[in-house]
Amino acid sequence: MRTILHSDANCFYASVEMLHHPECRNLPMAVGGDPETRHGIILTANYIAKRSGVRTGAALWEAREACPGLVILPPDYDQYLRFSGYLREIYGNYTDRVEAFGLDECWLDVSESCGIKGEGEKIAKEINERVRKELGLTVSVGVSWNKIFAKFGSDYRKPDAVTCVSRENYRRIVWERPVSELLYVGRATSAKLRKLGINTIGELAETDPDFLYAYFGKMGSTLSIFANGEDRTPVSLIGDQVPVKSVGNGMTMPYDLKTDEEVRVSCYMLSESVARRLRENGFAGDVIELYVRDSELHGLTRRHRIDVPTNISFEIAEEAFRLFRENYRWKKPIRGLCVRVSNLTAEKRPYQLSLFRSETVRKKQLIMDQTVEKIRRRFGDDAIRRGLMAFGPRITPRKRQEQVIHPLSYFQKGNLSGA
Amino acid sequence: MEETYKVYVEVGVIFERDGRIVPKWLKMGDVRYDIERILDCRRAASMKAGGCGLRYTIRCRGQNAYLFFEDTEPGAWFVESRQAVPAG
């Protein structure tokens, strides 16, 4: 039987800021986006603010209303990445099976380290103390024999705690909780389960798995396995890279876009960044996808497979803009756009030439992209821009490192329950 | 309760061949303090000053003190001080 830990840094961004700003420790504070460019939402808040009703995802004005006197600091992703690295260094002292789930959460498989480093709970307590002493942050750690229950353990008590979910207490800690708290049970699934009379995880666990499979398909079996603590998904090795399935970049515009020209410029801006990241990882893709969000926050997605895989910004941008022109009926101004390239292949892979594209022109465009990249690397992103960008919104796409923040899907590597 | 401040200081260091960074002196205001010995070096947070990094326990003018190397990009050295801006 394995020993799995789940370590969750409490109010991560806020805690990092409070470490560096001692004056905020006893005040309600939150980390939030920049209202000037309309990225104004709360990313996280400290416990004092949370108690006043400040929630992650709330607009800045909503948060200020709920909690007058709230101190809002802008996010400093470089700093958070740095601390995330330090956390993983500490975890790495106990095992090489450390799997990150976002910046602030990690699973650890310490089964093979127990002989040397001590029992799971002992390791968890040591980690908890080291994080406090060495980084000035607090973590909640859950200890159990599978990833799902270990995560329940860390959620159970916050902040700064270690909770063991054992064969003796899992019914109390996990089974009494509502189904909505189980990983991968969202609003729709929990509503469906409630209609079937299944309200707690324990009730889900005791429901016939064949019935759940019949009703929910594969996900039903998975949920049954999760609820019973039978998940055997391994914790990945520390160096493992998740295979990239698509590369995209999206932005909320600093002001609502109203003309085709503004959209075209934005497509180019986003495509340049996507193209660069594709090339950095040696990929090309032939499915171009565009996501448009209007001023009432309604979204529209269109994608198209082009004839030749590409990582050239011109080709990506033109296709994205074409998708836009063909599908968007300017009913409302545009709040946000996202350009994504998927169905990736290795860029050096031989491909069937197209009758309709000139390879000479493509080569020149690629060289141009690469040259622009070199100039930007040496002289900064603003050193060179396409001429057409003078006619669009002055937006600064996020720096490279900020583009890989979000937790990946639990099933990303194709590990479906491991059962 | 006494206030503690995070004060960045100028530090003269030697990079040993094996990569170790050895601080030799530090300067607060106009005063230069030679570091007689390094007793310890470990990663630690300073809740008082508000930061984290490699904490060197140094011996200076017969007294022990903490000198932190904040390993950001670029790095910087700071101390916990009772004065915000140390007198000369």
Image (cartoon, coloured by chain):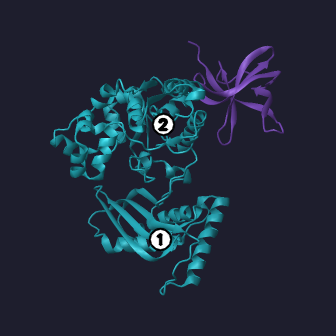
Image point (58%, 40%), residue name: A96
Structural distance between the alpha carbons of marks 1 and 2: 34 Å
Residue tagged by mark 1?
A316
Residue B50 in view: no
Residues beneath discs 1 and 2 located on the same chain? yes
Image position of A42 with respect to A129: above or below? below
Image point (64%, 69%), residue name: A371
Residue tagged by mark 2?
A13
Image position of A273 with respect to A398: above or below? below
Tell me which label, 1 or 2, sits earlier in the chain: 2
Image point (74%, 16%), residue name: B64
**Residue A139 image point, x, y percent:** 48, 29
SS label for mark 1: helix
Image position of A384 with respect to B50: above or below? below
Dot 2: within a 10 Å radius of its alpha carbon, few (fewer than 14), some, or many (20 or more) residues? many
Image position of A305 with respect to A377: above or below? below
Q: Give the amino acid at mark 1.
A: Ile
Which colour denotes chain B? purple
**Residue B87 image point, x, y percent:** 72, 21
Q: Are marks 1 and 2 in contact (CB under 8 Å)?
A: no
The cyan-tinted chain is: A
